[in-house]
């Protein structure tokens, strides 16, 4: 019989790989457009604070090692995004670029828009395949590993306080981005960032649950679980915005095409 430890490890690796690929599309999108206007500055800043408090709190309560590596990786990616936003806004000709995502998209044919979405779906499919393959390999490697109880943790009021602060920051970080999306119509936003964030957060919750459902264990991890569930809900809101504005843009282009013919 497959142990709970096997499922926990596999979920942990899925979470880890989700977060490894999560920032890459947005970093590339910023580089391609030479602009960071697709993201809210406050979203990235609050995320950075959340990642830092998550890292510090995780060390204090001896959080699972993959989670500590993730927190360190998140922090590094936040810094890269902030650096991109900083250097692109310092450019002499950046005045035009800063407004590019606040303007309507250039008129393109429905066929061209379809091809763009097709290429994007292909890239997303590759990243998704990598995440699933990582989880499958981790499952196969650890399929016979016996369950030896939950990872040893200790509760510390300082670590818990930092953990709850991190949860609050993670949850509220999405609000500036949601408001910005209403202005930019999600222009310049790489939606795989939030899709893989959903994958990473959901698999993290599963990792904790598979590790142990003991009350004390769940209580120690309650701040991280609360922050994770909160961001899952708001990431679904962002995903809903993206789908809505994609449909709105496709309808707009179709109407323009009909008027021209």
Image: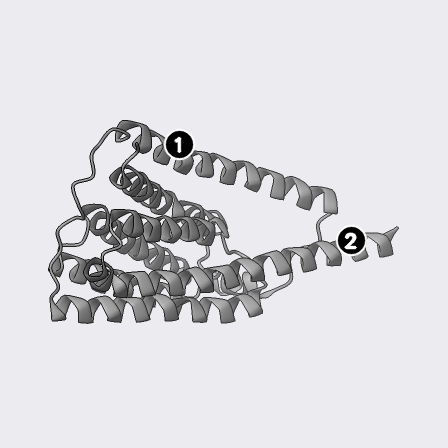
Residue closer to the observer: 96 or 70 = 70
Please say if 144 is above or below 47. Answer: above
Mark 1 or 2, closer to the camera: 1
Which residue occupies 25% across, 40% down? 5
Is 153 left, or right, of 203 in this rendering?
Answer: left
Q: Residue furthest right?
A: 261
Instruction: Determine the secondary structure under disc 2.
Output: helix
Is 242 left, or right, of 167 in this rendering?
Answer: right
Which residue occupies 27% across, 61% down? 224
Please say if 88 is above or below 14. Answer: below
Judge the density around disc 2: few (<14), some (14-19), many (≥20) Cα neighbours within 10 Å: some
Which residue occupies 38% across, 71% down? 172
Q: Residue furthest front?
A: 1
User: Can residue 189 be seen from the camera position used here?
Assistant: yes
Which residue occupies 32% across, 51% down? 204
Q: Are marks 1 and 2 in contact (CB under 8 Å)?
A: no
- The quarter of the rendered structure image containing the N terminus is top left
Q: x and y percent of residue 137 in the render? A: 33, 29
Q: x and y percent of residue 170 in the render? A: 34, 65
Q: How far separated are the C-alphas under marks 1 and 2?
A: 38 Å
Q: x and y percent of residue 90 in the render? A: 38, 62
The quadrant where residue 173 appears = bottom left
Residue closer to the observer: 234 or 259 = 234
Judge the density around disc 1: few (<14), some (14-19), many (≥20) Cα neighbours within 10 Å: some
Q: Which residue is mark 2?
A: 254
Residue closer to the observer: 225 or 251 = 225
Q: x and y percent of residue 232 in the render? A: 42, 60
Q: Which residue is mark 1?
A: 133
- Earlier residue among tags 1 and 2: 1
Q: Which mark is residue 76?
A: none
Residue closer to the observer: 260 or 151 = 151
Instruction: Determine the secondary structure under disc 1.
Output: helix
């Amino acid at each position: 019989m497959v142990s709970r430890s096997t499922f926990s490890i596999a979920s942990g690796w899925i979470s880890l790989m989700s977060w490894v690929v999560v920032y890459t599309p947005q970093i590339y999108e910023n580089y391609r457009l030479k602009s960071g206007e697709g993201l809210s500055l406050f979203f990235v800043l609050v995320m950075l604070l959340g990642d830092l408090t998550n890292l510090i709190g995780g060390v204090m309560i001896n959080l699972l090692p993959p989670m500590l590596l993730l927190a360190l990786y998140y922090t590094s990616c936040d810094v890269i995004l902030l650096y991109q936003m900083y250097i692109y806004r310092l450019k002499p000709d950046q005045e035009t670029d800063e407004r590019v995502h606040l303007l309507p998209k250039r008129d393109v044919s429905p066929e061209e828009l379809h091809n763009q979405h097709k290429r994007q779906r292909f890239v997303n499919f590759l990243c998704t395949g990598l995440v699933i393959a990582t989880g499958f390999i981790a499952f196969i490697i650890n399929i016979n590993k016996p369950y030896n109880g939950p990872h040893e943790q200790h509760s510390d009021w300082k670590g818990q306080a930092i953990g709850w602060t991190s949860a609050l920051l993670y949850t509220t970080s999405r609000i500036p981005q949601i408001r910005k999306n209403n202005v930019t119509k999600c222009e310049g936003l790489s939606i795989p960032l939030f899709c893989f964030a959903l994958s990473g957060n959901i698999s993290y919750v599963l990792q904790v649950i598979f590790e142990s459902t003991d009350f004390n264990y769940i209580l120690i991890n309650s701040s991280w679980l609360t922050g994770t569930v909160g961001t899952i809900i708001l990431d679904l809101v962002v995903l809903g915005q993206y789908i809505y504005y994609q449909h709105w843009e496709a309808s707009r282009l179709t109407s323009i095409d009909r008027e021209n013919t």
